[in-house]
Amino acid sequence: MRKAIVITGASSGIGATLARLLGSQGHRLVLAARSEAALQQVAAESGEAQAVVTDVTQRADVERLRDTAIAAYGHVDVWINNAGKGIARSVLDLSDADFDEMMTVNTKSALYGIQAIVPHFQARGTGHLINISSFLGKVPVASFRSAYSASKAALNSLTANLRMDLSATYPDIHVTLVLPGVVLTDFAKNAVGGGQPLPTLTGPMTPQTPEEVAAAIARVIEHPVAELYTNPAQHDLANRYVQDVAAFEGAMRP
Ligand SMILES: NC(=O)c1ccc[n+]([C@@H]2O[C@H](COP(=O)([O-])OP(=O)(O)OC[C@H]3O[C@@H](n4cnc5c(N)ncnc54)[C@H](OP(=O)(O)O)[C@@H]3O)[C@@H](O)[C@H]2O)c1
């Protein structure tokens, strides 16, 4: 079915790749990010798509994004909180500003999205909210990502609590948490203090392409689930982490 879909962080990486894929499938899109030229370019490559310059750290911008989407297509079926930013700084080196930025860009932005769109879903009795988190939000094994992993862990909790609150009274409103591992985008380069090369990752930690992650998100739009590890091998890894954290951390030590 053709859906009206909002994607934040659509000017690059996973969001841009997802926009092109969903556009090619005939969905109608509203795309948000701050970089206007890049966003317009992605919109031009994504079928029926509008670009709305948005800073997701500003609640008024996120509400304007919702209003623009509803004005364009009459309603919103799917809202994807994808915008995000990393950090390359260990816990002892974090400044107040570092911590605040991670929580604002990765967690508060999604809260603004939730609070903007869920009342619309409730009024319609249907809708799908998708929050893009990270494997590191469940298994914080890359210590240099510190406050980033913490911000995604907070997002995981908000997502689960929202789903619990809605499920009894709104069975047709779906809430999905997506947990990618390392994805081959400019994420590491764009991280605060970023730019250094990643270690070689193999086995279940092998990086995915944005196309693989976008395809997994497109499938979840068709078949909603509560949580999705875009690399299924990482679900097992997360279970092993929970079973014995000390052993897991020991195995990760260089
Ligand atoms: N790549 C990975 O390894 C990986 C792994 C797990 C999870 N993720 C998550 O996947 C999502 C997408 O990341 P990516 O890999 O595609 O990285 P990316 O290429 O750096 O894309 C990040 C996107 O977020 C947007 N953004 C950042 N701050 C924003 C703001 N204040 N307002 C509006 N948009 C903002 C950027 O657009 P503008 O700069 O134009 O605003 C850009 O479109 C993020 O939530 C990230 O945490 C990524």
Image (spheres, rainbow, N blue to C red):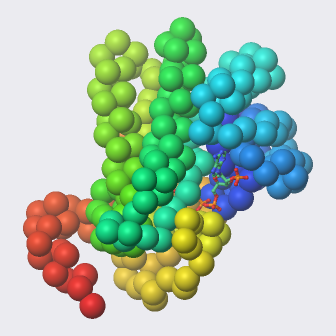
Name which residue lies at 25% across and 82% down.
Answer: 252
Task: Find residue 70 and report its horizontal and vertical position in percent.
Answer: 72, 19
Report the residue at 71% width, 24% height from top. Answer: 64
Q: Nearer the viewer, residue 194 or 110?
A: 194
Q: In the figure, residue 156 lies in which quadrant?
A: top left
Q: Position of residue 111 (x, y in %)?
A: 48, 32
Up the image or down, 218 lies above or below 167; here it is below
Q: Which residue occupies the foreground of this view, 200 or 234?
A: 200
Across and down, in percent, residue 139 comes to 29, 63
Q: Position of residue 143 (x, y in %)?
A: 33, 71
Q: Is residue 225 left or right of residue 216?
A: left
Which quarter of the picture shows residue 3?
top right
The quadrant in which the N terminus is found is top right
Foreground of the two, 4 or 142? 142
The answer to whether 15 appears left or right of 36 in the picture is: left
Q: Is residue 186 in view?
A: yes
